[in-house]
Image (cartoon, rainbow, N blue to C red):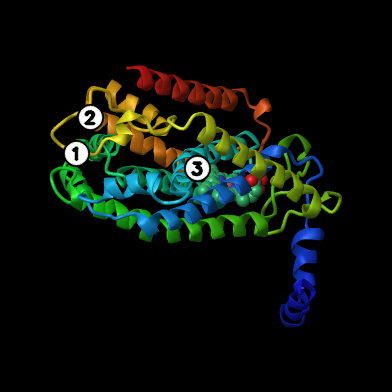
């Protein structure tokens, strides 16, 4: 049967040539390391979200009166509904973690440098979209946690002069978080963000394949200038398939192992008590915080007394992050040979971690 299908495709699209040129004859650098697999793990993480999300959508009711109940009945009445929801909730947190790690790894290896600036910019946009996915999805269960965390975040734009109130109003569909906000976030979460992320993912992977993956900086001895387009190839490298694909498969399995470990042994890690209470706009819970990945920017906003200054600083930092390859134009890719860059990198991570811990316990 399989042979019949492959013969059919062979005749019509030349399948064996695609497999040979794109997998077996496609060579990656000899000393490619495990961190290069994080990009594909992020793709798989997204696929898990899309598939589990589709099944959640079958039962979820996007209305303020029914949303909470529909999610609870999914957890208790629908066969394996709890598993799908837990995979989606834990998966969203793991996807953010994987994308962060991928970002740190491409930064460490200087893979964003000429001619890969666009790959970085598109990746940066994908990170922002991933975070918007989390933000919009967080409100959907309409629990105390989702309602109050969204109330805090949706209030942030009001610090901007002139347009601030308008932005917050458009986001919420009014002066406070209501059923209208739920509908807006739902539309964003299931209709706008998925095609946007998938298109950017296609562009990102196209750029990686078109330019050729970068070699780890320690082995990058190329002195050729990038004055015109060329594909970076590695004739003495290792085959993408099966050698590198096997490494990717290990990491994907590790990803699922972590996911099921959390679901089995730490089921309340991302679903604390407040997540199991229906939203009550008249009862503010005592300790409400954004998700762990928003804690650092949130804490920074709290520390700067002038709200306008705080939000402007964050917008500037995001712009610098997105356009970073155009600021750091030095040819040297090995961060260990660039003490200043290494210092900035380590300091940024230390500040981020510190702010996150501070945010968690304050
Ligand atoms: C949903 C998020 C993302 C997905 C699915 C994704 C996927 C991928 C894949 C499959 C690769 C090729 C293999 C690899 O080097 O790992 C890659 C490479 C790359 N990514 Fe991402 N990525 C994402 C986010 C990001 C972010 C946030 C950045 C940085 C801001 C980024 C920057 C890069 C760069 C510069 C490369 C080229 C690496 C090289 O040539 O060695 N990506 N990405």
* Image mark for residue 91: 3
The answer to whether marks 3 and 2 mark residues whose Cβ atoms lie closer than 8 Å is no
Q: Residue at x 50, y 42 (%)?
A: 91
| Residue 273, percent from left and from top | 33, 29
Q: Position of residue 84 (x, y in %)?
A: 47, 48
**In this rendering, position of residue 161 left or right of residue 261:** left
For image coordinates 44% across by 41% down, the residue present is 89
Q: Quadrant of the C terminus?
A: top left
- Residue 338 lies in quadrant: top right
Q: Residue at x 48, y 52 (%)?
A: 52
Question: Does the closest atom of ligand 1 sit within 8 Å of the Cβ of label 3?
Answer: no
**Mark 1 vs 3, N-terminal side:** 3
Mark 2 residue's CB less than 8 Å from ligand 1: no
Tell me if residue 284 comes above or below residue 222 in the rendering.
Answer: above
Q: Secondary structure at mark 3?
A: helix
Residue 312 visible at all: no
Residues at circles 2 and 1 in contact by the CB criterion of under 8 Å: yes
Quadrant housing residue 301? top left
Q: Earlier in the sequence, mark 3 or mark 2?
A: 3
């Amino acid at each position: 049967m399989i042979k019949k299908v492959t013969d059919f495709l062979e005749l019509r699209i030349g399948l064996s040539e695609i497999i040979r040129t794109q997998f077996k004859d496609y060579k990656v650098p000899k000393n490619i390391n495990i961190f290069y697999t994080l990009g594909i793990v992020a793709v798989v993480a997204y696929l898990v979200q899309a598939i589990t999300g589709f099944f959640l959508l079958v039962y979820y009711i996007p209305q303020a009166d029914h949303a909470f109940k529909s999610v609870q009945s999914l957890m208790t009445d629908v066969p394996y509904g709890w598993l799908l929801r837990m995979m989606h909730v834990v998966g969203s947190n793991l996807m953010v973690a994987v994308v962060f790690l991928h970002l740190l790894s491409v930064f460490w290896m200087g893979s964003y440098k000429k001619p890969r600036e666009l790959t970085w910019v598109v990746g940066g946009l994908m990170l922002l979209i991933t975070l918007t996915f989390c933000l919009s999805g967080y409100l959907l269960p309409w629990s105390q946690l989702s309602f109050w965390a969204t109330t805090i975040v949706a209030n942030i734009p009001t610090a901007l002069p002139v347009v601030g109130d308008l932005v917050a109003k458009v986001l919420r569909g009014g002066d406070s978080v209501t059923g209208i906000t739920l509908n807006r976030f739902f539309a964003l979460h299931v209709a706008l963000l998925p095609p946007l992320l998938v298109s950017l993912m296609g562009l990102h992977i196209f750029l990686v394949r078109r330019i050729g993956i970068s070699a780890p900086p320690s082995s990058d001895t190329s002195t050729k200038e990038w004055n015109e387009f060329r594909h970076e190839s590695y004739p003495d490298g290792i085959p993408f398939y099966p050698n590198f694909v096997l490494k990717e498969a290990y990491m994907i399995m590790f990803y699922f192992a972590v996911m099921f470990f959390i679901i089995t042994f730490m089921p309340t890690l991302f679903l604390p008590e407040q997540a199991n209470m229906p939203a009550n706009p008249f009862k503010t819970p005592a300790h409400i915080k954004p998700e762990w990945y928003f804690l650092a920017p949130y804490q920074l906003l709290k520390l700067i007394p002038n709200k306008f200054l705080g939000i402007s600083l964050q917008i500037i930092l995001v712009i610098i992050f997105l356009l970073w390859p155009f600021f750091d134009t030095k040819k040297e890719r090995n961060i260990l040979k660039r003490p200043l860059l290494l210092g900035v990198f380590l300091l940024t991570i230390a500040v981020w971690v510190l702010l996150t811990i501070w945010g968690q316990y304050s």
